[in-house]
Image (spheres, rainbow, N blue to C red):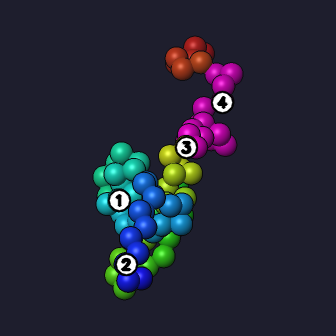
Amino acid sequence: MEGRPVPVLPAGGHPDDFLNDEEAATLLGVAASTVRAYATQGYLPAGRTVCILRLCSRRDIEERLNTPARQGEGGGRPSDTSSGPRSP
C-alpha cells in the first residue's frame, strides 16, 4: 500500500454493523435500559453477547424503527365496545 491513498470510508452505518445498547438506544430514541427491556420482552431480537457486551445488528434496530408497533392486535378491548360504563 506504499504510495497509495487510503480509501474513503462510506458515510453512515452498514446494516451488518453490530451496535451496543447505547448505540441502539440512540437510533431508537430511547434509553439503553429500554433497549434491554425490549430484548427481554421480544420486541427486539436478543442479539449476541461478546464477552459481557450485548450486541444487536443495525439491521434489526432499523427494522424495528421503520416498523410501527402493532398495538391492539390480538388483545385489548374489542373494537365494538364503548369505553364508558355499561348500564344494567
Q: At x 38% / y 70%, what residue is drawn?
A: 5
Among numbered discs 4 and 3, the one appearing first in the sequence: 3
On screen, 33 above or below 78? below
Q: Nearer the viewer, mark 1 or mark 4?
A: 1
Q: Badge 2 is on which residue? A: 3
Q: Is residue 50 left or right of residue 73?
A: left
Among numbered discs 2 and 1, the one appearing first in the sequence: 2
SS at mark 4?
loop
In the image, residue 43 lies at what x, y percent? Answer: 52, 55
Q: Badge 4 is on which residue? A: 78
Q: At x 34% / y 48%, what residue is drawn?
A: 30
SS at mark 3?
helix
Q: Amino acid at mark 3?
A: Asn
SS at mark 1?
helix
What is the C-alpha distance between the residues marked 3 and 2?
43 Å
Q: Amino acid at mark 1?
A: Glu
Magenta part of the chain = 67-81
